Image (cartoon, rainbow, N blue to C red):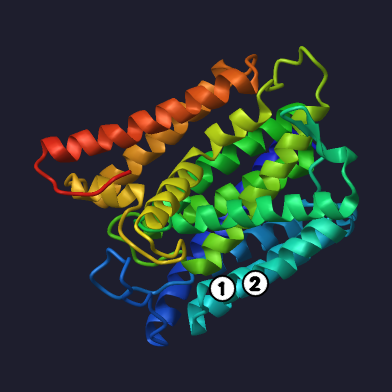
Amino acid sequence: MQPLTILFGPILAFAISFLLLPVLIKLLTRWELYDSEKEHRIHKSFKPSMGGIAIYAGLILSLVVVLPFQEWVKLKYFFISVTLMFIIGLRDDVLGLSPIKKLVGQLLPVSILVVFGNALLGVTIFSFDLSGLATWANVIITSVAIVLITNAYNLIDGLDGLAGTIGIICIFFFGVWFYLIGSIYASLIALSIVGAIVSFLFFNWQPSKIFMGDTGALLIGLLVAYFSIEFLNGNYSLPEGHFLKFQSSVGALMCILIVPVFDTSRVVILRLRQGLSPFKADKNHIHHQFLKLGFDHSKAVLSIASINIAFVLLAWLLRGQPDGVVLPLVAILCLFVNFGLKWAQKYAGANNTII
């Protein structure tokens, strides 16, 4: 596949989503399908949700044009899984699902992706060969990893433009890396979803006209999780000495996904320390901390995106280092960011509780 064909996918996805979004906003407003006012929401007005419909349409319709039919057949379980996750998000946005019901509902698309789509981890992590495990054990481990990453991404969707921006950074990296190692169709799918998300940001940037909703966040979260599995497997299969190989595959992935991983980890730890359910919504996410410093949505998003990009560059610079070097350094830097926010709030006179 020629480079121009690779570029045509995301351009077409962008155009489809961009043309659909104004229509979607008008229809959702007319039907009064709004993002409900919940405890953890920081928006003071009602706006239409379910922007993920346009993202999904842009992705699928563009791939109908540019992805060869044999690849559709080969990836049929992947697309079934993506569609089911999209439907679960749509169901939640329209009628609402409890966190437990939403989590249970995700097991179907994830199981299809792992069992029938063969999206299994085939790597050695910390000297532990996952490919040598019994199939059922690998299915469980991979499924748990996909569910965790999907929901970690979903949890960062709290500011205008935040989830979209972080999704673009993560998936764009995967798309370029897949292309460079020769996984052309994985690259095409990744870059096409990037094109759809970019168009969404035109309508979701502060002041937003529409929210992504779980319709989009669960869809993109699943794609981020799937590409993470493909990244680990692809990186493991590269020969030693290859300039694109990361010696610390887990450390590199943590850097790429640093915002959802770091944010979800800290809020879950904080909730458990307070004796609360990890599913309980609150205002202790990292984006809330930037808002408490007086940042508006745009500045907060750009600051968080800058952190993500810095960690991606760090992963690239340290690609020759093992997990024993990269992972401790990532942990130390996360603590530095966390306590840096704490110090900044204290200096600004804020009275907030941060881990």
* Horizontal side, residue 113 vs residue 104: left or right: right
122 over 56 or under it: above or below? above
Residue 224 at x, y percent in the picture: 62, 49
Is disc 1 placed on a helix, strand or loop? helix
Residue 278 at x, y percent in the picture: 46, 61
The quarter of the rendered structure image containing the C terminus is: top left
Separation (CA) of disc 2 from disc 1? 6 Å
306 over 45 or under it: above or below? above
Q: Residue at position x 19%, y 35% from top?
A: 344
**Marker disc for residue 100:** 1
The quarter of the rendered structure image containing the N terminus is: top right
Instruction: Rate crowding at label 2 as few (under 14), some (14 to 19) or many (20 or more) other CA atoms within 10 Å.
Output: few
- The residue that mark 2 highlights is 104
* Horizontal side, residue 78 vs residue 131: left or right: left
Residue 173 at x, y percent in the picture: 59, 35
Q: Residue at position x 60%, y 29% from top?
A: 252
Is disc 2 placed on a helix, strand or loop? helix
- The answer to whether mark 2 and mark 1 are in CB contact below 8 A is yes
